[in-house]
Image (cartoon, rainbow, N blue to C red):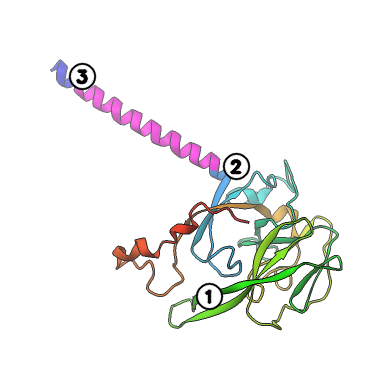
Amino acid sequence: MSLDTNSKAKAGSGWGETAKIIVQALAIAMVVRVFFFQPFNIPSGSMKSTLLIGDYLFVSKLAYGYSRFSFPFSPNLFSGRIFAAEPKRGDVAVFRLPNDESLDYIKRVIGLPGDEVQMRGGVLYINGQAVPKVYKDDFSNIECDPYFRHCRRVVYRRYEETLPEGVTYTVLDLEPEGEFDNTEVFKVPPGHFFMMGDNRDNSSDSRATVGFVPFENLIGRAEIIFFSAAIDEPEAMRWFSPWTWPFDIRWSRFFNLVR
């Protein structure tokens, strides 16, 4: 009887230790998620080819400090930011949409407070100076409607832009005279930022509906892609054909830094 009792006690102790470890792991994960790094996925093509639909990435909350939007459910505990650090021009940042604070957007920081930003003939101008734009290659991508009823291969011209601070990245151009290739001059007000998508002809950003983004609305800086799958391509990642999943994963994008 004593041996049986001891074995039960050991079993109970083992389950208790396991539960304790699980609870501790969950607590650590929650702290990391709330205060340090938050995962996000890319649902649209506005940042192609830097970020693709189906990319999953970590966003650093420490990069810009904390606002109420840094925390789950955006509790209205304080205004402004604590431990604040302004983003650098060229950062890829996640922010809460100013006119609908339930939505998260991801774009590139182009204009800082006090800057004047304009598009002329598809060329970006900052404070009256053209940002160098050099043709790099063509970028081919299969694009489908939301329900995969129609898919087509789209070929973009890909350019390399270099900001005044030396930050270099690529942008896509589909239409030579697109809707947002020529704009008014945007004067960025204090405490706000001008955001643009790298897919210049297919991005809702500060040139139109998004407007200027308050510093408070920034959530963090995109740092690294930890998973990617071609979910936007026809017949990719279907539940009824799991044997194809390894071929639908973009293995080469794993652990790519977001720049």
Q: Is residue 200 left or right of residue 248?
A: right
Q: Is residue 58 above or below residue 42?
A: above
Q: Which residue is mark 2?
A: 35
Q: Is residue 16 above or below residue 47?
A: above
Classify 10 Å Cα crowding around label 3: few (below 14), some (14-19), many (20 and above). Answer: few
Q: Which residues are magenta?
A: 6-32
Work out whether residue 97 or residue 176 is closer to the camera in this orientation and state it: 176
Q: Is residue 228 left or right of residue 128?
A: left
Please state which of the two labelled residues, at mark 3 or mark 1, is closer to the viewer.
1
Based on the displayed image, in which of its 4 quarters is residue 207 positioned?
A: bottom right
Q: Is residue 229 above or below residue 153?
A: above
User: Residue at point 44% right, 36% down?
Assistant: 25
Q: Are marks 1 and 2 in contact (CB under 8 Å)?
A: no
Q: Are marks 3 and 1 in contact (CB under 8 Å)?
A: no
Classify 10 Å Cα crowding around label 1: few (below 14), some (14-19), many (20 and above). Answer: few
Q: Which residue is mark 1?
A: 140
Q: Which residue is mark 3?
A: 6
Q: Tell which circle, 2 or 3, labels the residue nearer the N-terminal end.
A: 3
Verify whether residue 10 appears in magenta.
Answer: yes
Q: Return the x and y of residue 202 as percentages of the image width and height.
A: 63, 75
Please state which of the two labelled residues, at mark 1 or mark 2, is closer to the viewer.
1
User: Main SS of the magenta segment?
Assistant: helix
Residue at disc 1, secondary structure? strand
